[in-house]
Image (cartoon, grey):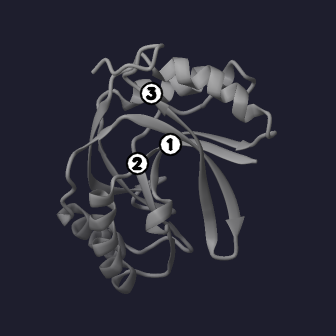
Amino acid sequence: MRLFIAVELPAEVREVLAAGLGRLKRDQPPARWVRIEGMHLTLKFLGEQPDELVERLDGAVRPALAPLPHVHVRLGQGGFFPHERRPRVAWIGGEAAGLERWAAAVDDATSSLGVEKEARPFSLHLTLARLERPWGVQAVEHYLVQVGKWRFSEFTAREAVLFRSELGPAGATYTALRRWPAGATAEGGDVS
């Protein structure tokens, strides 16, 4: 199974994205735009893994996240990987103090099960598009200006979700396999 661990986006954030993306898709050069229902904040990409890893992840990730507090997330401002002069991926960043602790806890828990540790530090971003060819200066500027106008409500991340990703002709389909709460004691109570 192809697996990853992420934070889901609430409906009100998805509504802002849907409205903004509708306009961007018409105005921007060709790109592979991410479907709204597939958008999430990735904490850890696990890649192809055997089915039996799911149960082992449950035993490792749940206790790693339980003592960590909920995280307030505010999305805003766009950017590109690797950078604006040679854009390949268009994204939205944001602020979420504490989400890097979630990512580190998930990374430590999964590496204890043999999954390779992340080489790069956690970077809060929401992928919007993968560019077929790097966009020119005008397209980059237009994207940054337009995305900079989007106004997202702050939301609280309360759980991480283990997703299975299945690639198909219409794009990836994601299925939630496990949900692990943060801010919960070992007995399952809320501590925030």
Residue 157: percent from the left, percent from the top? 35, 38
Badge nearest the viewer, 3 or 2: 3
Whether residue 142 is visible here, answered yes or no, is: yes
| Separation of residues labelled 3 and 2 (CA atoms) | 14 Å
Relative placement, left or right, of 94 versus 186 is left
Against 163, residue 141 (above or below) is: below
Kindly identify the residue that appears in the image at 70 percent across and 44 percent down: 47
Residue assigned mark 1: 6
Kind of element beneath mark 2: loop
Tell me the amino acid under the disc marked 3.
Answer: Trp
Tell me which residue sits at (61%, 54%) in the image: 175
Between residues 75 and 123, which one lies in front from this camera angle? 75
Is residue 87 visible in the rendered image? The answer is no
Q: Residue at x 42, y 24 (%)?
A: 101
- Graded by Cα atoms within 10 Å as few (under 14), some (14 to 19) or many (20 or more), the crowding at tag 3 reads many
In-front residue for pair 57/47 = 57
Observer-side mark, 1 or 2, equals: 1
Is residue 151 left or right of 113 when viewed as pictured?
left
Is disc 2 surrounded by few (<14), some (14 to 19) or many (20+) residues within 10 Å? many
The residue shown at (67%, 45%) is 3
